[in-house]
Image: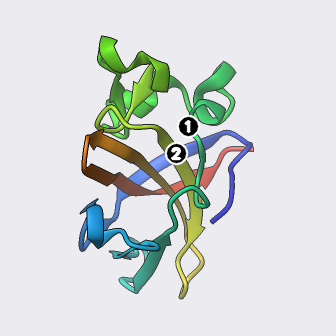
Amino acid sequence: MYSISKKIKIGQQAHMTKNIFTNDEIGQSAVTKFTCCNCGHENTLEIIPYKSGFPIFQVYNEDKVLSKNELLKNKMITETSHRMLHFGEVTVNDLPTLYFGTLCESCHAKYFGVFGYGEKQPGLTVLAISGIWKYEDLE
């Protein structure tokens, strides 16, 4: 996983095998698979809580990578409910939200992923991946 610092153009959303993990399903990490839109290769994706990802604010701050409107339009994030605004103005499932860049293991196509992770309610920890989208650099 890597951070993205230059403008990108979002493309097709990749198919994922699983995008919601709770409590014991997360354990040390959450592992899912996504299918490359280019070559059809099934890629393994591992998200390690508190280690994987970068704050989503870095993406839309000053429209550096993507605008907030592009993130909302592609359903990568939603506006945060008023009671959870301490997590930021946009989130995934009202959870602290992070993003990452990754590559197809076979053809090296570039992908942009967004997920939320945290305690949804006492005793319920959730990792929700809103999706993984193919992207191209604009610069």
Residue type highlighted by circle 2: Leu
At which x and y percent is residue 28? Answer: 46, 74
Q: Secondary structure at mark 2?
A: strand
State the residue position of label 1.
56
Residue occupied by mark 2 = 98
- The answer to which of 97 and 100 lies nearer the viewer is 97
Q: Are marks 2 and 1 in contact (CB under 8 Å)?
A: yes
Q: What residue appears at the point 29 percent right and 18 percent down from the top-left corner?
A: 81
Q: Position of residue 71 (x, y in %)?
A: 43, 33
Local packing at callout 2 (Cα closer than 10 Å; few below 14, some 14-19, many 20+) is many
Q: At which x and y percent is residue 106? A: 53, 88
Give the structural element (helix, strand or loop) at label 1.
loop
Report how far apart the C-alphas of labels 2 and 1 lie in the structure.
Answer: 5 Å
| Amino acid type, residue under disc 1 in the picture | Ile
Please identify the quadrant where the N terminus is shown. Answer: bottom right
* Residue at 32 percent of width and 28 percent of height: 78
**Residue 9 at least partly seen:** yes
